[in-house]
Image (cartoon, grey):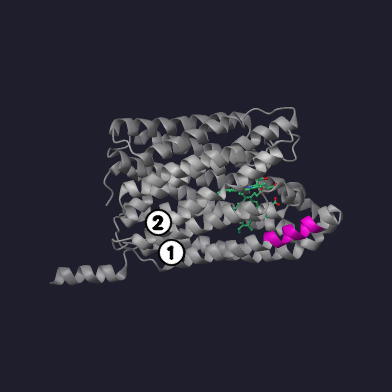
């Protein structure tokens, strides 16, 4: 049921991404154990918290990027109405990137790290990542050029992917002046998640909407223009919300505060637009599950990034919450709501098409979606309570770091319980995706027609 056979290259990308997702969650649980209990020093000496944290976050970035790349390879032939330029290059790229990822994870274990959070990968491995990214961009660009069927959705996706790759370069050098180093570090981190990745999400989401609701392309695409404009306007200057306390000039307090407070606006637009399509959908939705995932993503994106982001973005509040578990709460809800759910939506759509199923068994997928979504939300709340406690005890009352940590342990135990629930949901989703089966009613109906 896929129109172009090279769309199949997406499949191994997705399978690897799912496996890394599971590994990432296991690492997250281990981190929570570190916070919830006092571990023996011998254990911490062999496997320090910082190493496990680097693995947790780098696995996250790697699986999400592999998911985006697979998603792009699945979408671009359909948008360009042509086969992928080079499937071989796409497979080689996957092997290169996964190889680099594995080398990085092993390296972290032995202390081979550049030290910057989320960008711990050491410089020599960075070059391999850059080569992988170039292979990817070349393949996608050549396919678009070959197809000569230029669309706004495709253009937005390409703009997001190029921005993503270019920004990565700013994280490569290490500046001895730490203020400068952090300054550029945020170009990667902030302008990725609140710029480039948002464009990619908007494009893939628009394409999915066209595909699953059957609404007219021009209806979906017109909001892409508005959204891109707003993302650029608020997202770029919004970087200032990370420049409050790193030794950057004073005016960032104003610029960062004002522009980042406006950042939820494009996300609200996306939510509003989705609600609009839900009301207007005229075709019968082939798969309610995929539709649920898409709506869930729009709402969760708004909550995790929009509301939770807004909550601590003004300097008056961030002064107390900066770098606390409030940040961790937002990080989890935003990453899960926007990017993990986007990937899961794409996976369900692509897996069902790749297996030639218009209608498939949805029950496990629904359980998986609700279990992961609810346990992640509760986990985010528990991190949030720990963070408010931390901000109050440490920053308002001025208690010591360890005294405060002790008061927070209960909430990390709750995080751990929610995390175990989350793992159950993830296992269900992975099992379901890998064994996707036709819906029984569909089989029954087909048998009936065959008999008649
Ligand atoms: C999907 C989009 C988003 C994702 C994935 C995301 C993720 C993150 C992550 C992981 C961090 C922690 C970085 C670190 O210090 O290691 C962070 C920090 C922050 N985010 Fe977001 N974010 C998103 C959108 C937003 C939006 C829209 C806002 C504002 C309205 C916002 C406001 C903030 C602020 C103020 C911080 C700094 C917290 C501190 O000072 O410790 N974020 N974000
Ligand atoms: C069982 C599930 C999980 C648990 C128990 C867990 C736990 C943790 C813990 C304890 C940290 C360290 C926080 C710190 O340094 O103070 C962390 C960091 C992080 N985790 Fe998770 N995690 C889980 C799943 C996830 C998922 C599914 C995502 C993304 C979709 C995610 C994204 C992140 C991010 C972005 C950070 C860095 C946060 C920051 O810099 O503020 N985690 N996680
Ligand atoms: Fe930011």
Q: Nearer the viewer, residue 92 or 244?
A: 244
Is residue 348 at least partly visible in the picture?
A: yes
Q: Which mark is residue 348?
A: 2
Q: Which mark is residue 28?
A: none
Q: Main secondary structure of the magenta part?
A: helix
The residue depicted at 80 percent of the width and 52 percent of the height is 41
Badges 2 and 1: C-beta atoms under 8 Å apart? yes
Secondary structure of the residue carrying numbered label 1? helix
The residue depicted at 44 percent of the width and 50 percent of the height is 15
Q: Quadrant of residue 421?
A: bottom right
Left or right, residue 50 beside residue 40: left
On the rendered image, what quadrant is the C terminus found in? bottom left
Q: Is residue 254 above or below residue 268?
A: above
Q: Which residue is denoted by mark 1 in the rendering? A: 365
Q: Is mark 1 within 8 Å of ligand 2?
A: no
Q: Earlier in the sequence, mark 2 or mark 1?
A: 2
Q: Nearer the viewer, residue 209 or 73?
A: 209
Q: Nearer the viewer, residue 13 or 297?
A: 297
Q: CA gap, disc 2 to disc 1?
A: 9 Å
Residue 79 screen position, x and y as percent = 32, 42
Residue 63 screen position, x and y as percent = 52, 46
Q: Nearer the viewer, residue 439 or 321?
A: 321
Q: Is residue 263 above or below residue 140?
A: below
Check the image and name the residue furthest to the left.
452
Question: Label 2: few (<14), some or many (≥20) within 10 Å?
Answer: many
The residue depicted at 66 percent of the width and 41 percent of the height is 256
Residue 321 screen position, x and y as percent = 74, 52
Question: What range of the chain is rendered magenta?
Answer: 383-392
Residue 337 screen position, x and y as percent = 53, 55
Is residue 243 at least partly visible in the picture?
A: no
Left or right, residue 426 beside residue 146: right
Q: Is mark 2 within 8 Å of ligand 2?
A: no
């Amino acid at each position: 049921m896929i129109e172009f056979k090279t769309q199949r290259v997406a499949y191994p990308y997705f399978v690897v991404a799912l496996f890394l997702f599971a590994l990432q969650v296991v690492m997250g649980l281990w981190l929570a154990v570190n916070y919830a209990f006092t571990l023996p020093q011998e254990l911490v000496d062999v496997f320090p918290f910082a190493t496990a944290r680097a693995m947790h976050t780098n696995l996250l970035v790697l699986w999400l990027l592999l998911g985006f790349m697979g998603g792009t390879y699945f979408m671009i032939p359909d948008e360009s109405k042509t086969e992928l330029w080079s499937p071989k290059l796409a497979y080689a790229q996957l092997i290169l990137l996964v190889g680099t990822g594995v080398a990085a994870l092993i390296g972290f274990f032995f202390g081979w790290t550049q030290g910057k959070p989320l960008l711990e990968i050491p410089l020599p491995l960075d070059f391999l990542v850059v080569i992988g990214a170039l292979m990817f961009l070349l393949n996608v660009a050549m396919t678009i050029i070959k197809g000569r069927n230029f669309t706004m959705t495709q253009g937005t996706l390409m703009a997001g992917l190029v921005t993503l790759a270019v920004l990565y370069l700013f994280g490569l050098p290490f500046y001895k002046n730490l203020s400068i180093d952090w300054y550029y570090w945020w170009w990667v981190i902030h302008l990725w998640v609140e710029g480039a990745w948002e464009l990619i999400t908007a494009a893939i989401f628009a394409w999915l909407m066209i595909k699953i609701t059957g609404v007219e392309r021009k209806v979906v695409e017109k909001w892409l223009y508005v959204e891109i404009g707003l993302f650029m306007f608020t997202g770029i200057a919004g970087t200032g919300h990370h420049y409050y306390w790193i030794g950057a000039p004073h005016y960032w307090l104003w610029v960062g505060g004002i522009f980042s407070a406006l950042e939820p606006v494009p996300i609200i637009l996306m939510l509003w637009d989705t609600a609009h399509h839900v009301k207007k959908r005229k075709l019968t939705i082939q798969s309610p599950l995929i539709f649920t995932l898409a709506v869930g993503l729009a709402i969760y994106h708004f909550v995790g990034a929009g509301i939770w982001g807004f909550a601590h973005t003004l300097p008056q509040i961030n002064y107390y919450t900066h770098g606390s578990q409030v940040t961790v709460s937002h990080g989890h809800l935003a990453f899960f709501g926007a990017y993990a759910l986007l990937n899961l939506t794409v996976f369900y759509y692509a897996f069902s098409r790749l297996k030639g199923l218009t209608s498939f068994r949805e029950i496990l997928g629904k359980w998986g979606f609700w279990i992961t979504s609810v346990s992640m939300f509760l986990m985010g709340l528990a991190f949030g309570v720990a963070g408010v406690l931390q901000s109050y005890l440490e920053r308002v009352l001025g208690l010591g770091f360890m005294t405060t940590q002790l008061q927070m342990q209960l909430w990390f135990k709750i995080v751990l319980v929610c995390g175990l629930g989350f793992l159950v949901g993830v296992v269900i989703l992975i099992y379901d995706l890998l064994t996707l089966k036709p819906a029984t009613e569909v089989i029954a109906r087909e048998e009936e027609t065959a008999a008649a």
